[in-house]
Image (tube, grey):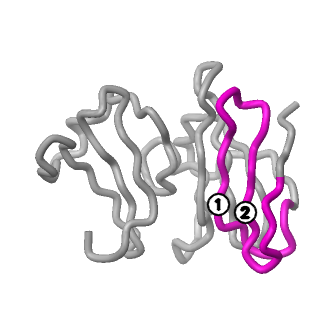
Amino acid sequence: HNSFITHLDFSEDSEYIQSNCGGFDLMFHKNEDGMVINSPSMLKDIEWHTFTCTLGWSVQGMWPEVTDQTHYNACDRSNKGGKSIVAAADITGLLHFFHYPCITKGSPSVKAQAHPGQITNVRFNANDKFVYTCGGADRTVCQWKIT
């Protein structure tokens, strides 16, 4: 990467890592030796154990048509039930829920105002019954029940 690492995920088999950086790059590496995968299409069928990278094929539909690449600070894919939801935290304090994978530009989301300013992070709990958000300016951690 050419900047600090912002997000990091391991494949289900722990053979690969995907990561984003502050320079808004998406990179793939072999876990064993750190070798860069220069052909991301080689990993198109890889299942990811977690998905927190805000840049990637399976979350490209959450991004607005016009953006300066800072719209979403964080995202997290649900853990169970077909891994079918991704929660995304934006800079305006909105928490978005998208179907996963979210590949179509302009994909609709269910939104909720979670914080008065930016959300710095978001995570599902282990059984996907709750989502936790970290506020920036308000310095709070909130728990949201998924219904």
Q: Nearer the viewer, residue 18 or 105?
A: 18
Q: CA distance from mark 2 to mark 1?
A: 5 Å
Q: Secondary structure at mark 1?
A: strand
Residue 141 versus residue 132 in the image, above or below: below
Residue lying at 59% horizontally and 29% vertically, measured from the top left: 79
Q: Residues within 10 Å of mark 1 (few under 14, many from 20)?
A: many
Measured as percent of width and height from the top left, residue 65 is found at 59, 64
Mark seen at residue 134? 2
Residue lying at 68% horizontally and 59% vertically, measured from the top left: 89
The answer to whether marks 2 and 1 mark residues whose Cβ atoms lie closer than 8 Å is: yes
Q: Quadrant of the C terminus?
A: top right
Instruction: Compare marks 2 and 1 and give the one earlier in the sequence.
Output: 1
Q: Secondary structure at mark 2?
A: strand
Question: Magenta residues?
Answer: 114-142
Q: Residues within 10 Å of mark 2 (few under 14, many from 20)?
A: many
Measured as percent of width and height from the top left, residue 143 is found at 83, 49
Residue 11 versus residue 35 in the image, above or below: above
Q: Nearer the viewer, residue 132 or 28?
A: 132
